[in-house]
Image (spheres, rainbow, N blue to C red):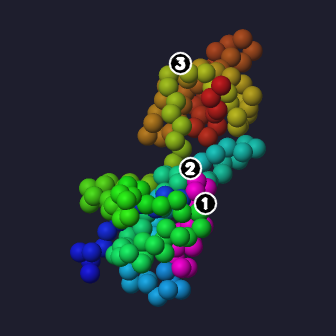
Amino acid sequence: MSEQLKWYVVRAVSGKEKKVKQYIETEITRLGMTHLVPQVLIPTEKYYQMRDGKKIAKERNYFPGYVLVEAVLDGELEHVIKNINSVIGFLGDKGSTAVPLRQSEVNRILGKVDEMSEQGEVMNMLYYVGENVKVMDGPFNGFSGVIEEVNEDKKKLKVMVKIFGRRTPLELNYMQVEKE
């Protein structure tokens, strides 16, 4: 049976991916087809966001509008999935049959999902030397400065700010600054 298991991409209304996943799982269970669909997956990534000076962990879809389904797709199951609320169809749908992902694509996507879950929450802001930033947190809140150094490994920046007319270096982490 594992030879017939293939990964398919279901196109969903953007923003409704979690509902579509829930609907697919509920419908498959109701029809007794759980042996045909071992996994329904929404690749997500975690990131930080600053709100009111506090670091908040959030999660967003890595592929908005898509839900991955591992399934033995026969005609009936394909019809069931296509008729679920908020499902647009299958990606690469050729006429009446869904096209499975190539194994190389599956490995790449699942590898990326594993990598993101191991990595945990990431701050995906890129800062560059010479860029202007505003300090959002700490004793120098509200000051603006220019990035002198970027330490990608430690997620730290060396920022030059003018305090009483003198240039002063500050070492700040990514969460303490915001691009201007």
Tell me which segment is drawn in magenta: 13-27
For this view, does 46 lie left or right of residue 3? right
The residue beneath circle 2 is: 47
Quarter of image, res 168:
top right
Q: Nearer the viewer, residue 112 or 164?
A: 112
Q: Earlier in the sequence, mark 3 or mark 1?
A: 1
Decide: marks 2, 1 in contact (CB < 8 A)? no
Q: Position of residue 176 (x, y in %)?
A: 64, 37
Q: In the image, which disc is placed on residue 16?
A: 1
> Residue flagged by tag 2: what amino acid is it?
Tyr
Q: Is residue 23 magenta?
A: yes
Q: Are marks 3 and 2 in contact (CB under 8 Å)?
A: no
State the mark number for residue 130: 3
x and y, in percent, of residue 131 in the image: 56, 21
Mark 2: give few (<14), some (14-19) or many (20+) Cα within 10 Å: some
- Mark 3 or 2, closer to the camera: 2
Q: Are marks 3 and 1 in contact (CB under 8 Å)?
A: no
